[in-house]
Image (cartoon, rainbow, N blue to C red):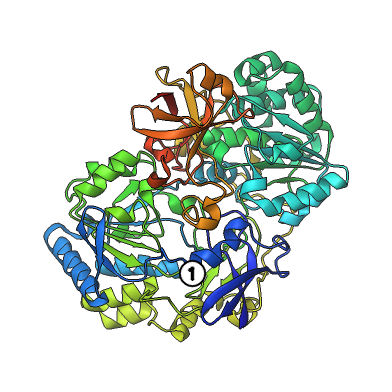
Amino acid sequence: MKIISTVCPRNCYSTCSFKVVIENNLVKSIQPHSGNLATLEGPCIKGLAYIERANSKDRILHPQKRIAAGKYERISWEEAIETIASKLSYYKGDFGPHSVLFFASSGMSGLLNGVSTSFWKMFGGATTTYGNLCWPAGLEATRLTLGANNHNAPWDLENAKLIIVWGKNPAESNIQQMIPIEKAQQNGAKYIVIDPRRTSSSERANVLFQIKAGTDAALALGLAREIIKNNWIDTDFINKNVVGFESFKKHVASYTPEKVAEICRISTSSIIELARLIGTIKPMTLIPGYGMQRYENGGQTTRCLLALSVITGNIGKKGACWHYANLQSYVFDDLKEPENYYPGCEHPSFRRKISVAKLGEDMLKMVNPEIKMIWVERGNPLTQNPNTNKIRKAFRKADFRVVVDQFMTDTAYEADIILPAKNMFEQSDIIGSYWNPYVQLKQKALEPAGEVKPETEIYCLLAHKLGMNSDEIKKNIPEPNDAEVEKYLNKFLEPFPELTLEKLKEGPLLPNSFEEIPFSDTIFPTPSGKIELYSEEAKSRWGVNPLPDYVPLVQEKTYPLQLLSPNSKNRIHSQFGNLNIIKQFEPEAYLFIHPNDANDRGIINFELVKLFNNEGSAEVKVQFDLGLRLGNVVLTNGHWAVDGATPNLFTKGIETDMGHGTAFHNTWVQIKKI
């Protein structure tokens, strides 16, 4: 038996450290790791589910090829590599390298993911994607305003006297964040939630403001008006550190409590009271969620919320923070998110890019050359990208598809060849976090199961089979052994003497550049060197109002119910939901609906209904939820088609107003009895 320090590499805010107990090359248990002050209590149910995930009988352990629709047979690695190399050579020779789409997402983070990019550069290029499904509208809004995406250390929340969680449900999606929130409450802090839903997080709050979905910016501007009107602003902070306040003051003057109450569907007295709390209680930490910026108006909405922290001086102080994204552990990145999502920053070999938000539509539009072959790794676009039916059509239009995955996902079932992917315990890698500030080692703990080969080894085999230059291969792709992988990782660590593999094997480390309270020096890396409420770049780059602004959503009148697809405690996007330990809590997809909306349609609780709009339809069971606003329905993010319904059957490919994000929540549907 051995106990090994490691870290969860999923696309999750927490990025938990934990210890894994290994016996006879099997995962036996998951234990907390005291080395990470942000995740002392250990991982969530999904982290604990790694025991089943690593040992699952449903895992893909061998290469497979399609023999009929939905049917596959085992093949050798030799046949798989030979077939793929032959196809790549053919499409590159006859149509050029950009006839191949390389699609990779965020299913497993780590520095070794750069090997795939190196391979496709050596191939001569490929069509790739730009943008991001998750959070770039908010990232860009923060970058435009503060200049960088850093926030106070997670444990600093204990110092706040007012905590506002706006459009986030950390009790399910970031459970470790609830610990400092509750400690702050015990110390007398007020904890407020603003959300269209009543959630596990709001149950612990002092107050819930349940506003109409998509109107967050209007509420923020109305609150700003009241704060300014009552002189609850931090005048000294504004005079020294803020550009555009006077213009912003004039801009918000029309957002009276009466106007905002009409837009947001909450009372004027609630608006006035919330403004008083924000304006008079310090220090305040404002924690916006990612769902709140997954509307077409998401970037400007985020700027409006951030303005509340700015005008009250709640930036760069203990307990005073805009707590959205913390990229302090991304020390190896030359260009940080969101700018690395944007077209124009890529290597010339990747000059042809398509939008992740409009993946299916853009794939179908590709000409000279058309998309002939698709390679997918670390992603499940048939479930996770908008407009599932259009993506499926685009996938089936291509001649040949390869999917690298651990399980038979919706996307894997579209593949001609499926290659087994490593799990998190089968290869070492270095991981950052966008919440806690630690650099961590996801340490190898197991030998790969079955015939599984890490993706780096797959690329090494393909590169040699394609006859690529051996020196270039050696330079860009580690040989398939642990020593070469560690050598590859050590190249990244060389500029950081405080970060070594030997130390990282013991637990997480803080880089020397770590700041517990970013912006405490009031230095902001914006064009003006100050916080920019008025941003010329917002106007020139994105064509939006240079001031934070509310842009109403356009509702489709044919479909009266707004579909929200928030994250669930049971999945990280489309991962983990197939496991038995998770299915005991959520065996199938449910459409959550307020009983009054259901009664209006003659629908009873747990009844199977037809859910539909112009993009797609499915049959799904409803479940009553008195905590929802009327007019909202919820189908949580990440359900596979086999669960009954995936939310992206109903979404359109719409980008956010900035950041090339994805407007999942610009979605309206209808339901009816079957």
Whole-percent x and y of residue 670?
42, 24
Which residue is under mark 1? 55
Q: How many marks?
A: 1
Label 1 Cα crowd, 10 Å radius (few <14 / some 14-19 / many 20+): few
Q: Where, by quadrant of the figure, is residue 443 drawn?
A: bottom right
Q: Where, by quadrant of the figure, is residue 117 drawn?
A: bottom left
Q: Position of 20 compared to 360: left or right?
A: right
Q: Nearer the viewer, residue 444 or 121?
A: 444
Residue name at image x 42 percent, y 49 percent: 342
Question: In which quadrant is the N terminus drawn?
Answer: bottom right
Mark yes or no: residue 317 visible: no
Q: In the rendered image of this protein, does residue 370 appear above or below residue 589?
A: below
Q: In the rendered image of this protein, does residue 380 appear above or below residue 606?
A: below
Q: Position of 658 compared to 3: left or right?
A: left
Under circle 1, the secondary element is helix
Whole-percent x and y of residue 570?
56, 50
Whole-percent x and y of residue 321?
72, 46
Q: Residue furthest right?
A: 187
Residue name at image x 61 percent, y 57 percent: 45
Whole-percent x and y of residue 163?
76, 41
Residue type, numbered disc 1: Asn
Residue name at image x 49 percent, y 43 percent: 637
Q: In the rendered image of this protein, does residue 538 appear above or below residue 369?
A: above
Q: Residue furthest bottom?
A: 483
Q: Nearer the viewer, residue 180 or 592?
A: 592
Question: In which quadrant is the C terminus drawn?
Answer: top left
Q: Position of 617 compared to 170: left or right?
A: left
Mark yes or no: residue 581 visible: yes
